[in-house]
Image (cartoon, helix red, strand yellow):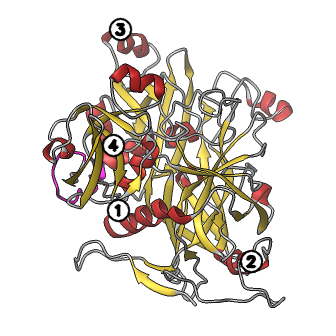
Amino acid sequence: MDMKTNWKALVLVGLLSSATTLAGFKLLSSDSERDVIFKESPAESLARFTSSGAPAGSPGDFVYAAEATTPTVVHIKSTMTRTSRGGQGDIPDIFRDFFGDDFGGGSRGPQSSEASGSGVIISPDGYIVTNNHVVEGAQELEVTLSNKSKLRAKVIGTDPSTDIAVIKVESKNLPAVTFGNSDAVKVGEWVVAVGNPFNLESTVTAGIISAKGRGLGIIGQSQNRRYGNARPTAATAGDSPLESFIQTDAVVNPGNSGGALVNLKGELIGINTAIASPTGSFAGYAFAVPSSIVKKVSGDLVKFGNVQRGYLGISLDELDSRKAEEYGVKVNDGVYVRDFTENSAAKAGGITKGDVIVKVDGLNTHSIPELQQSIGLHKPGDKVVVTVNRNGTEKDLNVTLRNRTGGSDVIKRDESAAVMTTLGAQFGNLTDQEKQRLTRYKVDGGVKVLSIDGGKLARTGVEEGFIITKVNGKPVKSVKELEASLAGKSESMVQFEGLYADAPYDVYSFGFRM
């Protein structure tokens, strides 16, 4: 099977219905910003031994990894309110008494649904990392610790461009995972996956690293593609998806999303995120976000509320022998520079069109996902050494990365834009013809959903063409009014009301926490 183009299904695996050193992730100094304290393995791990007397991490020994990791992995239950039909006043209640609330194609009142996934404790004071698609659209989050304690959690921040989110519970002295170096893992190395597949507690499976730097194109895709119970989300405004997955054959199934992928020393090397399967269940291919990305993203989410990503500002193409001949370059391995964006950091650093990027900071770069990972781990203003092959000769160029707007400043989260982005949709004003048609149904305006790209609206079952008429009980008649109604609601409960033009008698009501 062609792993790049012939997936029968790519499933984000989160949703299933009804001797160590401490290191601070210091980015910038500010009294108003806080850091999450990560537990990290030292450069050379101290010798540890299992109960059998063998060194921890010996080939084929999974006991130490399981014992070290299981207490740090939690079960996450998310509760959300899905779209339900109402306004069926023309159907007598006696029919519903006999046939149930679904008689007539609708039900009265909102319908609550549950989904579940996994998470990994990353600091003793309650910060937990998981997948964005596990918590997206949740009205309530409940975390179950390994000791069966159940705690309410709140969302600290999300990054749809990497499908990573950070949530927090109010607790202390929790067991935190030790971060390993995902860049150092080797293909063929043994790994252990820990999570809660099918709502089974603390399940441990083993496998090997099958590949690194996989770019699957699953983040930011349309909801119309099949992803089982979960859908990938659109990247936040201006942020392109960052995919450089670790592939493993350790068994991962729905409910494992957000769980830990660790090496035999019990060190976190990835967060389990997706499986490739024709059925929605494990078929031999599982994918995890590398811990290097997880650490960068989660640290930024805690400190800034969004991710500070450095950008080269170039349009790219991956090389093979055919493209190398087409472009007339001397190498067929690397990333070809086709053009530059406005205020490009790469152009300012001396990179030219037709260059082939072969290394970043001395590390070989064979593909676009590898390049994105190397650059995405840096913040705006960081300096990197980019090695390019130009006409058969390698040149080292010092490049100062910029933010997505072409500057070097930290980009604070725009609350109003962030709220609109989490909805995962494009909106438009009603045409005069649409307004005229709806007046006969006593609807005098609204905002139309033009497209759905994942996000909270997709999770509540909203489809293209839905017309939002009220937000928290107040009418909205334009996109501007919709934006205004959501201003300052980043951590609030929001209730939508609306209808579809082809079913104007059916009024839908649903809510979720932004």
Indicate whether residue 413 is drawn in magenta: yes
Which range of residues does the magenta coloring cover?
Answer: 404-416
Q: Nearer the viewer, mark 1 or mark 2?
A: 2
- Could you tell me what secondary structure mostly forms the magenta stretch? loop
> Decide: marks 1, 4 in contact (CB < 8 A)?
no
C-alpha separation, residue under disc 3 versus residue under disc 2: 71 Å
Instruction: Report the amino acid beneath label 3.
Output: Gln
Indicate whether residue 405 is drawn in magenta: yes
C-alpha separation, residue under disc 2 versus residue under disc 4: 37 Å
Instruction: Report the amino acid beneath label 4.
Output: Ile
Q: Which residue is mark 1?
A: 305
Q: Which residue is mark 3?
A: 433
Please state if 239 lies on the left or on the right of 293 as rendered.
left
Binning the other alpha carbons within 10 Å of mark 3 as few (below 14), some (14 to 19) or many (20 upward) gives few
- The residue lying at 25 percent from left, 41 percent from top is 313
Q: Which residue is mark 4?
A: 357
Secondary structure beneath dot 3 equals helix
Which disc number belongs to residue 58? 2
The picture places residue 142, in percent across and down from the top left corner, at: 63, 66
> Decide: marks 3, 1 in contact (CB < 8 A)?
no
